[in-house]
Image: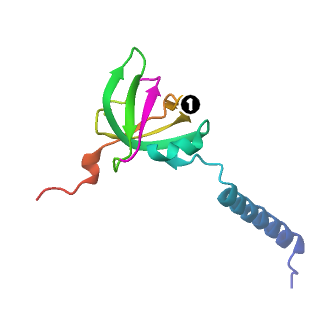
Amino acid sequence: MVRPNPARLVIALAVASCLAIFLVYTAIAGGGTPSLKPSELARHKGEQVNVTGKVAGPVRVRAVGAQFRLRDIDGQGVVTVVYRDALPDQFKIDRHISLDGRLQKNGVFAGKPDSMVTKCPSKYTDKKT
């Protein structure tokens, strides 16, 4: 009869313990970017955040990028956004977007280049019968 090797059990338990500690740490400490509405930005000045809202006019398109207003989807808060990169093809007024960046001291949200994602509302509405 062959006796099981206790070293294999110790190594397996050590690996499982390390994975469990890593999972608990990432769940508590996070390290992720908070996702906010424009009305919630004031408390997060200077922090890297993700903001989600609806594009409101006017939209001023520049050589590279644009300046526009972004409001809460439910219409409560508004913030001016400066985005210095090419706009996505689906970008337009009343479109839902998500954008990474920082709220500056002057109250303008500076969008991080290549971080804007547009959401097509027709994908989320019921089909007409």
Q: Judge left or right: residue 118 versus residue 30.
A: left
The local crowd at label 1, few if under 14, some if 14 to 19, many if 20 or more residues have their Cα within 10 Å, is some
* Residue marked by disc 1: 104
Compared across the picture, whether 60 is left or right of 64 comes to left
Q: Nearer the viewer, residue 66 or 6?
A: 66
As for residue 51 lying within the magenta part, the answer is no
Give 60 or 89, whichever is nearer the viewer: 60
Is residue 4 rendered to the left or right of residue 123? right
Side of 101 relative to 87 (left or right): right
Residue 118 position, x and y percent, is: 37, 39
**Count of picture labels:** 1
Q: At x 24% / y 54%, what residue is drawn?
A: 125
- Quarter of the image for the C terminus: give it: bottom left
Q: Secondary structure at mark 1?
A: loop
The residue positioned farthest toward the top in the image shown: 63
Q: Which image quadrant: the N terminus? A: bottom right
Where residue 68 appears, as percent x and y from the top left, is 38, 29
Q: Is residue 124 above or below residue 51?
A: below
Kindly indicate the quadrant of the structure image that contains residue 17.
bottom right
Estimate the x, y position of residue 86 in percent, counting from the top left.
Answer: 41, 23
Magenta region: which residues? 76-86
Q: Nearer the viewer, residue 2 or 23?
A: 23
Q: Position of residue 128 (x, y in %)?
A: 13, 56
Front position in the image: 103 or 119: 103
